[in-house]
Amino acid sequence: MSTATIPPEAPSRVPCAHCGLPAAVSDDGQSEAFCCRGCKGAWELIQNWGLAEYYQLRDAPGEEVGDESGRNWDDLDDPRLLGRSAPLAIESDTSVPLLRSTLSLAGIHCAACLWLIERTPERVTGWQSAHVDMNRRRVEIVFDPTKTKLSEIGRVLHRIGYSVEPLAESGDTKDDVSRQLLVDLALAGFCAANAMWIAIALYAGQFTGMAASHEQFLRVAGVGLGVAAVVFPGRIFFRSAIASLRTRTPHMDLPVAVGLLAGTAASIYALFDLEAEVYFDSIACLVFFLLTGRWLQMRQQRRAGAAVEALMRLSPTVATRVNADGSSSRIAAEQLAINDQVLVRPGESLPIDGIVVQGESMIDRSLMTGESCPVRVAPSHHVEAGTENLQTDLVIRVTALGEETRLAELQRAVADAAASRTPIVQLANQIGAWFVVVVLLLAIITAAVWFNVDRSQVLGNVVALLIVACPCALALATPLAIAVSIGRLAKRHVLVRSGDCLERLASPGRIFFDKTGTLTEGRMRVSDWFGDNTALRAAGQIELQVRHPIAQALSHFAQIKLGHGFDAPKQAIKIEQTVGRGVTGEFDGERFQIGSMQLLETIEPLDSEMQSHLDTIVASGSSPVIITDHERCRGVVGVSDPIRGEAKSIIQWLQDSGWSVGILSGDHPAAVARVARSLSIEDSAARGGLLPQEKLDAIRAATGDQPVIMVGDGVNDAAALAAADVGVAIRGGASASLAAAPVVIDGGSLKGVKSLVEGARQTRRTIGRNFAISISYNVVAVGLAIAGWINPLVAAALMPASSLTVLGLTLASPSGDANEMDNQPASIETNSALEPVI
Amino acid sequence: MSVMYVALPVAILLGGSAVWACVRAIRNGQFDDLDSPPMRMLIDDRPTSNEEPEDD
């Protein structure tokens, strides 16, 4: 028997040619290596199309191409199931009308993806064109329905590593808001630019002399533009100032509105008094600068939001109903009724809560409960929407639908948690409240002083003070710094949808991690192997046809370990699964049995070496799997959900920076304690066996002065994510958690947490510095105004100068890109299948 | 200098028509996606399909 223990004989690894995950070196050592069949297929397809240039163009590796079996693409062909993505007929030159459909697209990162996708239609009959929208992660597909189907196109895109989903409902309101802001920005820009050159003409006139009629004409035109800027694009400041007065919450827009109002009123008054100054150019520029900051922040947030939306796999909206006559039909889940029977195939998620009436299978509840091991279900067992069927067909009688399901209940808890969270008051707004008070007090003092000195100058000086005190740079500082940070974080695969939360993370607080799928990889991997390669190859081939996390781990391990030695001319046959016990199958004329420790009772006793390996596996906390040929044990395998490679260093870093780290998990307390120990997290801070409500309570209890971060991936984390000051969802989890969290880590690596905390600190520093600068400007200007020295030239120069300084310094702030390379999502080390186990 | 009475309204009018065009473009969604067009520009338009006639 040739034995192979790991890690000593682990084959050397190279990045997969398509996705960059670790793969075994190919036989000849020359040709490309692949981590899985999916990636190999994608690579070959792209080569065959003559689009190999993609691999030179791209700047990041592609997505791992998953297997196709779990996906029912046919749903893309039924317009009723597509919602907003339903294909519409468009005019075309040919007699056949073409159809156009817009779908949400996941998996694109760079120009090469766009190139590849837009080139693909040339290779597929009937697919006319593809138009990718990188910003909103959408693709507009035009196809000829007589030659191809949307499901075919979906399948082709999946084969090259991208996946499409129908658009989520009601996504267009965001577009309207963003367009309106851009329209306001255009109007403000127009007013500001024209007011500026009119102002220059007036200043020039002051030095060289100008006829009074000309001067008055220019002033009328300038004031007209200034008033237009305040009335049309500037109205949002008044609206939010009024709202802030009504709700008595401080807001930066209040001092801005006061300044705008004073400037406008003074300018209009000055039209009738040639001695007074007009401030229309300052007002128009102010509106323009402030809107620019806002638009930049909104644009960055929206981009992150669209990227998250594309990742969300909506809970299944389609179900297979078993009709009374035994036939089955695909219908929208909302058309189901209580007591209907629903067929759920392996790999599908359950659309409803119900009771199993037929079939025995394993279901994966990890996203719902955090349990890392699949659960066995049989007739009369109760099952929940959102869990995934793994093994065999199940027929389920519906007991709860839509809003009544446990999943919907959890989602309501998420909405409640989000609504009850104390809103983050931005630093700018805290200062804003003080600002109004101080400026108004100063205005009163100025008025009082000048009333005694020179009554004719009272009005002019008070107005000058109100205008130069307007916190233009201050109001610009925050959105600008946040927009820059969101952009930089997005480059490191951290998507921030709400910029406010960046301000909350500046000082250390408490951070809680979910276990399954967050601290661990969330999927089973082989951690120990002892036995002969023949048995491994056979076991891998048999398990290829079984849909179970352990089976997938075993066949994946066999593929990587044996490389091309794994490929076989014939598939394994006579696969029989016994739920809870294991699987038997025939490969290459030999029958094998793969299953739990129970199999040991049916075979000869183990030799001492086998026994010692088995003991090691059991002691390490991995699940043991036995491979037998019905007589002797041929191999023992340890399978576990390994801790992410980067977890230890990230937690160490967080602890060193002063964060208190805890675990909140729904998995068994023993498993949680083991993970906590290996990550040096205190036992008291690691809690297991928690229900979603208990996680939520734990977060609420921790909330106080310090910021609280929750990092999670499952539906059971969603409410806690929404309640925490900053919820961080890990990509690859449930869409409910992606929807609940304001921050999503797209790279699937915990390094994103470090980037986020560092980015937040950097943001806080930038904002602080911007404040210091703009407040110094204001203090100087206010001093000059009180002294009565301010003249239009100084006012006009000071205001844009402070804004431009803030702008320049924010854009030039160091981005800390030095360790950017560490954040590549798929480095060989962190993804090694042989990661040391717990 | 009285030419100013004509020049200024004309300039505002010209600028105004540009703003009008810009607003129309925004409302038509031309500014919704500012990421893809700069990438698309870098893609060569060479008809790759001619090089591999055996493909569909």
Image: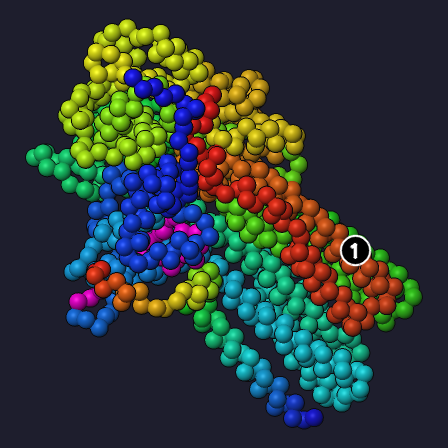
Q: Quadrant of residue A30?
A: top left
Q: Quadrant of residue A551?
A: top left
Relative to A788, residue A628 above or below: above
- Residue at 15 percent of width and 41 percent of height: A329
Q: A249 above or below A380?
A: below
Q: Could you tell whether A348 is left or right of A716 in the image?
A: left
- Residue placed at 49% from the left, 75% from the top? B20
State the residue in front, A419 or A96.
A96
Q: Is residue A273 above or below residue A408?
A: below
Q: What SS does tag 1 mark?
A: helix
Q: Nearer the viewer, residue A141 or A231?
A: A141
Q: Position of residue A239 (x, y in %)?
A: 58, 58
Dot 1 crowding, Cα within 10 Å, few <14, some 14–19, many 20+: few
Residue at the spot of label 1: A776
Q: Residue furthest left?
A: A325
* Front position in the image: A261 or A205: A205
Quadrant including the N terminus of chain A: top left
Q: Nearer the viewer, residue A115 or B11?
A: A115
Q: Estimate the x, y position of residue A343 in percent, counting from the top left.
A: 19, 33
State the residue at coordinates (22%, 18%).
A593
> Residue A793, how many percent across, how many down?
78, 73
Where does residue A786 sit, x and y in percent of width and height?
85, 62
Q: Residue furthest bottom?
A: B2
Name which residue type carries label 1.
Ser
Does residue B4 appear to the left or right of A441 in the view shown?
left
- Determine the residue positioned at 84% across, 63% down: A784
Tell me, yes or no, if residue A344 can be seen here.
no
Q: Is residue A577 visible?
A: yes
User: Would residue A638 be found to the left or right of residue A712 on screen?
Assistant: left
Q: Is residue A693 magenta?
A: no
Residues rendered magenta in the picture:
A96-116
Q: Quick check: is A112 in the magenta stretch?
A: yes
